[in-house]
């Protein structure tokens, strides 16, 4: 199902675009409940693929963070990173949609059971942590006990995505 209100969805996208235009952050993270892309049971969210993902790419977002799916993963597509960490309550859904992700992308990490809640991943839950420095943004995916299962780093955004002055537009 799509958004309950197409008017509210359009207003929200416009609001997001304004915030993205204004940002000169070294690391720009956007978070939402539903994933844009997902390897797990529910799969990717069509409306977000079509409407939100292009905005994130246009303004050089570092990563999109989401939950909803009770699994954890890192997916990269065309220099855009997607971190899903939805295992805060229960783990894990199966990765039944891993082969439905767009071709050309790379599923860099996935924590999922073979089948929804089969228990074979050995995890009961999990979370992600972030550490930013001038050189890199480090993302760690943890098991419920705090053990780090996966770690990756993102570089600061390119200057072409940052504001030069109050009248400037992001350049592509």
Image: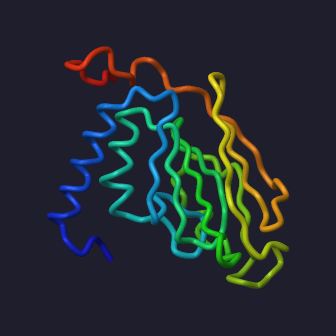
Q: Is residue 59 left or right of residue 84?
A: left
Residue 52, horizontal then vertical, whole percent: 34, 51
* Extreme residue toward the top, this view: 164
- In the figure, 45 relative to 166: above or below? below
- Of residues 102 and 37, which is closer to you in this image? 37
Q: Which residue sits at x=66%, y=70%?
A: 87
Q: Residue at x 80, y 81 (%)?
A: 119
Residue 62's x, y, as percent?
Answer: 51, 37
Q: Position of residue 105 (x, y in %)?
A: 57, 46
Q: Give coordinates of residue 127: x percent, y percent.
A: 69, 61
Disc count in the image? Answer: 0
Q: Which residue occupies the foreground of this view, 113 or 106? A: 113
Give the residue drawn at x 71%, y 60%.
110
Residue found farthest to the left: 7
Residue 104 visible within the image = no
Left or right of 27, for residue 6: left
- If the image is split into quadrants, where does the C terminus sit? top left
Q: How is the image coloured?
A: rainbow
Question: Quadrant of the rendered structure where residue 7 is?
Answer: bottom left
Q: Is residue 76 above or below residue 46?
A: above
Asked if residue 46 is positioned above or below residue 163 in the image, the reply reads below
Residue 138 left/right relative to 167: right
Q: Quadrant of the N terminus?
A: bottom left
Question: Can residue 115 be seen at all in this image of the molecule?
Answer: yes
Residue in view at x 71 percent, y 76 percent: 91
């Amino acid at each position: 199902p799509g958004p309950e209100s197409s008017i509210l969805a359009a207003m929200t996208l416009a609001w997001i675009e304004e915030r993205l235009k204004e940002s000169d952050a070294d690391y720009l993270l956007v978070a939402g409940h539903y994933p844009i892309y997902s390897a797990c049971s529910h799969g990717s969210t069509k409306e977000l693929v079509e409407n939100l993902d292009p905005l994130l790419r246009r303004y050089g977002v570092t990563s999109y963070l989401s939950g909803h799916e009770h699994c954890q993963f890192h997916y990269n597509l065309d220099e855009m990173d997607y971190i899903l960490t939805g295992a805060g309550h229960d783990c894990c859904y199966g990765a039944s949609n891993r082969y439905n992700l767009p071709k050309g992308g790379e599923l860099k990490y996935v924590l999922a059971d073979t089948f929804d809640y089969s228990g074979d991943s050995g995890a009961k839950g999990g979370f992600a942590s972030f550490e930013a420095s001038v050189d890199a943004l480090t993302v760690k995916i943890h098991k419920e006990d705090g053990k780090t299962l996966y770690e990756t780093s993102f570089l600061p955004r390119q200057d072409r995505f940052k504001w030069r002055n109050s009248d400037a537009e992001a350049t592509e």
